[in-house]
Structures are given as C-alpha cells and as structure tokens.
Amino acid sequence: MKIIIITQEDSFVVPKNIEKILNLENIELLKVVDIDSNYSLVNKKSYFIKGFGLIQTVKMGLKVVSAKVLNSIDRITSYKLAIKPKSLQAVSERYKIKFERIKNPNSAEFLEGIRALQPDLIVSYSAPVVFKEALLKIPKHGCINLHCSYLPHYAGVMPSFWTLYKKEKTTGATVHYMDSKIDNGAILNQQEIQISENETMFSLILKSKEIGGNLMCKTIRDIQNSNVKVKENFAEKGSYFTWPTVEQFQDFTKNGGKLI
C-alpha cells in the first residue's frame, strides 16, 4: 500500500508514529508533508505567551530546542547514534523518504504532484488545514485523520486544552475518514483515554497522540485486509470547539491548569 502522510510539525510523537507505520508490512511511504500554515501550532508562539505566560512557554520552548539539538547531532553523526528523530524532516531523512514543507495542500501545484504519485491512502495527523474535495478524491482508499478526542465530542481545535478546561475525566483518540468538514467523517477506530489528576496539556497531547498512533496502524492494517468497520460520526450529537481566547488560557492557568 502506497501512503502519503500530511501533518504539521511535531517534535515529540508524530515522528515516532511515522516509524510505526514504516514497521507495518507491505507499506511504501511515498512522502511526508509538513503544513506550515498560520494555523499550525508551531506558529502560535505569541498566542501561547499571552495565554500561558512567559515561564510556561519558555519551558515548552526548551523542550523544542532540545529536540532540535538532538536532530542536529543525529545528522552530524550520519544517524549512527540511534537517537529517535525529533522532527518530520529528521524522520524523513533517516528513512530516505521524500519530504516537503508547504502552506496549502489544496493548491493546484501540490495536487498535481500528489496525483502523479498515485497514493492508495493519505494519512493525516491533525493536519491544520481542511482538505478540499479535489485532494480527498485522489487516494484509492481516501484520506484518514487522527483527532485526539473521542468524536463526536470535542471536535475542532485543541481538544486536549478543551477537555482539561472543561474538567473532563476522560477524552480519547479517534481515526476517521476525512470529508470537507472538520472532524466530520465516519469513524474507523477510537479509544477512550483516562485523564489523570495532574494532567497537563502537554502530557495529554503526548498520551493521546501515542495511543492515536497505534490506532492509526490498526486502521491501516484493517484497510489492507479489507476489514474496515465504519461507525457513523454523529456530529450533531457531539461538540465543536475553535481556538481558545487568550482570556480562556489565562482562566485555565488561574484554576491550576498547566501547559507543561
């Protein structure tokens, strides 16, 4: 099965999830695509500083910088130290996969390149841009996405923040077909996740993406084996959230919530 991965930059879990896919049998990973848009989390630094304060944001930034340093060491040593890749580009270089950084996956130029590759499946790990019909129709088996909540609940943006903000005891990870609406397509696999008492936004993101990566691999195997069990995604019975305001971030921290 020929797969293209479209996602946004992540230094912690998505590179590991890509490695999990590479370990599946009969998989050819054609390309990894990083969407570097205004809606990507890595481009929201000032937003997080205003919301979470300088100290929390710096602590998060230090983790990202540390990951970049490890990537640099890994590249200098020609990947001989067995350091786990800490970026999309690093994991692509290590496994000699084509890598591309773009703004808009719906552009005519990008679509032309994807059509030429003839993928069987496009995998999204929370891509920050809505896929339009032209892109959705290219792969034989469609486009599937990991969303880090138990859909149809907490669809939309930053589910890990919103579940903590609303003081939920559980959340989830869901792999679903993509359509032209956000987190709206039929559900393929999902798992409930317990939220611990000392959970931070960062720890919940790591936990849900890790579990979600395993669900994605299971879903890919199901598609390979023609063993897909589709469950309707009753969006009208769920909930949808957009970007939190700075005031909501500040309210979260005042009530003991933490970014990291």
Image (spheres, rainbow, N blue to C red):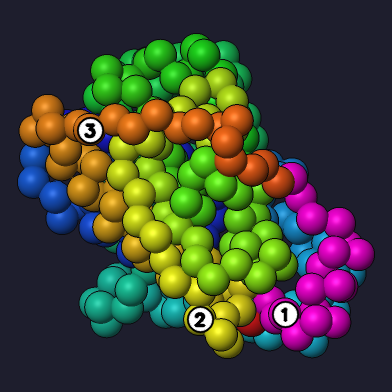
Q: Residue shown at 40%/29% (left/top)?
A: 232
Q: Report whether 139 appears left or right of 89.
A: left
Q: Amino acid at mark 1?
A: Gly
> Circle 3 is placed at which residue position?
229
Q: Residue shown at 79%/73% (left/top)?
A: 252
Q: How far is disc 3 from disc 2 in space, using C-alphas?
A: 30 Å
Any magenta on residue 30?
Answer: no
Q: Quadrant of residue 103?
A: top right
Residue 109 in picture, x, y percent from top left: 54, 18
The crowd level at tag 3 (other Cα within 10 Å; few <14, some 14-19, many 20+) is few
Dots 1, 3 in contact, CB < 8 A? no
Q: Which residues are magenta?
A: 242-259
Dots 3, 2 in contact, CB < 8 A? no
Q: Report whether 230 appears left or right of 25.
A: right
Any magenta on residue 252?
Answer: yes
Q: How far is disc 1 from disc 3 in space, using C-alphas?
A: 37 Å
In terms of depth relative to the viewer, which is nearer, 81 or 3? 3
Q: Amino acid at mark 2?
A: Ser
Residue 114 in picture, x, y percent from top left: 40, 22
Q: Quadrant of residue 98?
A: top left
Q: How far is disc 2 from disc 1 in space, using C-alphas?
A: 12 Å
Q: Residue shown at 41%/47% (left/top)?
A: 174
> Circle 2 is placed at which residue position?
196
Q: Amino acid at mark 3?
A: Lys
